Image: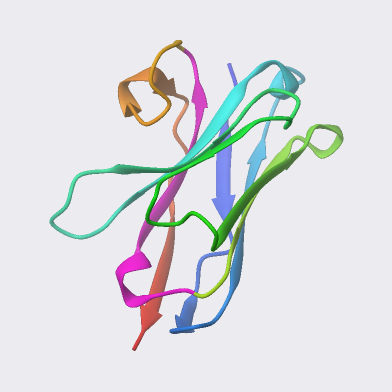
Amino acid sequence: QVQLVESGGDLVQAGGSLRLSCAASGRTFSRYDMGWFRQAPGKEREFVAGITQSGGVTYYADSVKGRFTISRDNAKNTMYLQMNSLKPEDTAVYYCAVRILGGLWYDDKKYGSWGQGTQVTVSS
């Protein structure tokens, strides 16, 4: 089973940038599609971005398209989320997860092995 640890969250001003990392344990990381989700206070968890096993195909929520970039380095067992032009509405706890079932990429029920999350706060 893959275990995931997120890092890189911080307090940043609107318009700034952050890069989140998701480090995976085990030697099977490259076998899995992966995803980033986020959850703001009082809101449901929502899909942010997804990436296929090789990194060749990526998916984004409309709210982050053009500002966020998902990537992965299978040699380092790590996935990244580069976040640019941050907005206050991006404030949330960000989670990475393994996509364990097929189907809709934005459905969090298709994911498992959730990390503990990392807090991103964007001030206006």
What is the x, y in percent for residue 29?
70, 24
Furthest-right residue in this view: 75
Residue at image location 60% in from the left, 23% down from the top: 33
Vertical relation: 83 (above or below) 1: below
- Queried whether the magenta region covers residue 30, the answer comes back as no
Residue at image location 31% in from the left, 43% down from the top: 46
Residue at image location 19% in from the left, 60% down from the top: 41
* Residue 123 visible in the current orientation: yes
Region rendered in magenta: 86-100
- Queried whether the magenta region covers residue 97, the answer comes back as yes
What is the x, y in percent for residue 25?
68, 30
Furthest-top residue in this view: 102
Vertical relation: 95 (above or below) 83: above
Q: Nearer the viewer, residue 96 or 55?
A: 55
Quadrant hosting residue 75? top right
Left or right side of 108 for 44: left
